[in-house]
Image (tube, grey):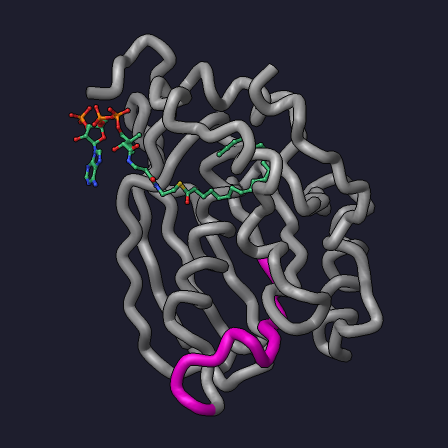
Amino acid sequence: RLLSSEKVSDKNHSLPKPCWGKDMRLLFDQFMKKCEDGSWIHLPSYEYIATQRSQDFPTFIHASELINKEKLSQGRLFTKSFEDGLGFEYVMFYNDAEKRIVCVFQGGPHLQGMPGFFHGGAIATMIDATVGMNAIVSGGIVMTANLNINFKRPIPLCSIVLINSQLDKIEGRKLLVSCNVQSVDEKILYTEATSLFVKLNPEKEFD
Ligand SMILES: CCCCC/C=C\C/C=C\C/C=C\C/C=C\CCCC(=O)SCCNC(=O)CCNC(=O)[C@H](O)C(C)(C)COP(=O)(O)OP(=O)(O)OC[C@H]1O[C@@H](n2cnc3c(N)ncnc32)[C@H](O)[C@@H]1OP(=O)(O)O
């Protein structure tokens, strides 16, 4: 099948690594404790989306003829395309009752925009991944239709931050998800975002 050529990397990047900082480990341990009663779930994260649902992806997106098989075999999740510690280090936890995802994100030195601060596109990437995961767990095969971001405060390079995402509404195929990015002590609000995800419609022809 189209995606069956995907390599399955068994490296789960959502477990502590030597490059994780103190706050990253502290928060990981705090959230793993919250998982003990089942209210929170620790989400694994691999370099390749090799889950069953991603195998169905081409049937949902009628542009599958656009998918170049050779290029696909080289495909890798963008957030997993940096050496450990240099790009996106993160771990996500999901609370089904509250339809919330908390992502603990440690950005590396290769995510620089203005000297000493994160690139806005890097922040947008982690927001998209977090609200996107929130939409996926509730909506299955979805794509981002709209992402609005207010950058309130610049985030110092190599910061560890909390991304709090909340599923706000499901309307037919539309899922509205909002989120904010805060310092780990929750004293600084760096970024706020709203997003719209749309469940792909297998019957709908892409024009
Ligand atoms: C991806 C999941 C695969 C399975 C994963 C499995 C396990 C998970 C493991 C790892 C996950 C890792 C990574 C994934 C993480 C994050 C996900 C990132 C997602 C992305 O990074 S993805 C790339 C950027 N994304 C695009 O590349 C999309 C380009 N785009 C399109 O492909 C179409 O545009 C589409 C499909 C969005 C909609 O197309 P469509 O034809 O299906 O729907 P249609 O147009 O009919 O709209 C239906 C209703 O939404 C309203 N609507 C639509 N767009 C709107 C807008 N912009 N503003 C306001 N309203 C809008 C309409 O107004 C209508 O509303 P109403 O029904 O009320 O009239």
Query: In the rendered view, would you say 89 is above or below 50?
Result: below
**Considering only vertical position in the picture, is 43 above or below 49?**
below
How many numbered discs sit on the rendered protein? 0
Q: Quadrant of the C terminus?
A: top left
Q: Is residue 114 or residue 42 the one in the foreground?
A: 114
Residue placed furthest toward the front: 70
Q: Position of residue 143 (x, y in %)?
A: 38, 35
Q: Is residue 117 above or below residue 131?
A: below
Depth check, front residue: 139 or 112: 112
Horizontally, residue 24 falls left or right of residue 11, namely: left
Using the image as rendered, state which of residue 2 and residue 86 is in the foreground.
Answer: 2
Q: Say whether residue 110 is magenta.
A: yes
Q: Residue at x 28, y 68 (%)?
A: 150
Image position of 107 (left or right of 131): right
Residue located 36% across and 82% down the image: 153
Residue 4 is a magenta residue: no
Residue 9 percent across, percent down from the top left? 76, 41
Which span is picked out in magenta?
103-115
Residue at 77% over, 48% down: 12
Residue that extends furthest to the left in the rendered view of this protein: 207
Quadrant of the rendered image containing residue 96: top right
Kindly identify the residue that appears in the image at 27 percent across and 57 percent down. Answer: 148
User: Left of 152 or right of it: where is 167?
Assistant: right
Task: Residue lying at the far top in this picture: please name it.
Answer: 203
In screen coordinates, is 171 left or right of 142?
left
What quarter of the picture does the N terminus occupy?
top right
Q: Nearer the viewer, residue 40 or 45?
A: 45
Q: Which quarter of the rendered image does ligand 1 occupy?
A: top left
Q: Where is residue 32 shown, x and y percent of the image? A: 78, 54
Q: Position of residue 132 (x, y in %)?
A: 46, 44
Q: Is residue 30 above or below residue 109?
A: above
